[in-house]
Amino acid sequence: MKKDSARMRKVKSVMAKLPMMLTCAEFEAFVLDHLEGTLPKRQRLIFRMHLKVCRDCRSYLAAYERSVELGKAVFQDPESPVPGEVPEDLVKAILAAKQ
Ligand SMILES: [Zn+2]
């Protein structure tokens, strides 16, 4: 356990040195760039840190990635039927992240 707390202290000291931390709204603005891989290195680091500490944004990102995948699946196979309904847990995750 001693090792963990030393590690946490280190993480906190690194975080304290960062010029800025993301708010959840800023995180949301970065999601698209993150998925496209166009986030600059520094923003990517801050983005990942927020993801580690913020459960809401983790579920938001997971829901976002899932909806992108659903969209791609439909796009790649136009003959396939469009999913009739959005999965209930996806809706819940998006709503929870928005609150
Ligand atoms: Zn957040």
Image: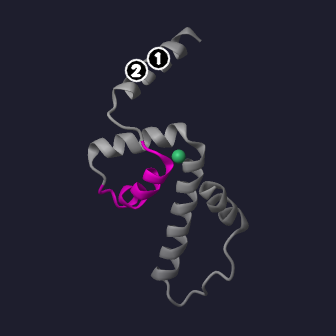
Location of residue 5 with respect to 39 vertically, above or below: above
Along the viewing direction, whichever of 23 and 68 lies nearer the viewer: 23
Identify residue type, mark 2.
Answer: Ser
Horizontal and vertical percent for residue 64?
53, 62
Asked if residue 57 lies left or right of residue 92, the reply is left
Give the main secondary structure, helix, strand or loop, of the magenta stretch. Answer: helix
Q: Quadrant for the N terminus, please.
A: top right
- Residue annotated with mark 2: 13
Q: Is mark 2 within 8 Å of ligand 1?
A: no
- Residue annotated with mark 1: 9
Along the viewing direction, whichever of 58 and 24 lies nearer the viewer: 24
Q: Are marks 1 and 2 in contact (CB under 8 Å)?
A: yes
Identify residue type, mark 1.
Answer: Arg
| Separation (CA) of disc 1 from disc 2 | 6 Å
Q: Farthest residue toward the right?
A: 88
Location of residue 43 with respect to 76 vertically, above or below: above
Res. 41 image quadrant: top left
Asked if residue 48 lies left or right of residue 70, the reply is left
Highlighted range, magenta: 22-38
What residue lies at 46% left-to-right and 80% top-to-bottom?
76
What residue lies at 40% left-to-right and 61% top-to-bottom?
32
Asked if residue 68 lies left or right of residue 18, the reply is right
Q: Considering the numbered disc 1 on the image, is that residue within a helix, a strand or a loop?
A: helix
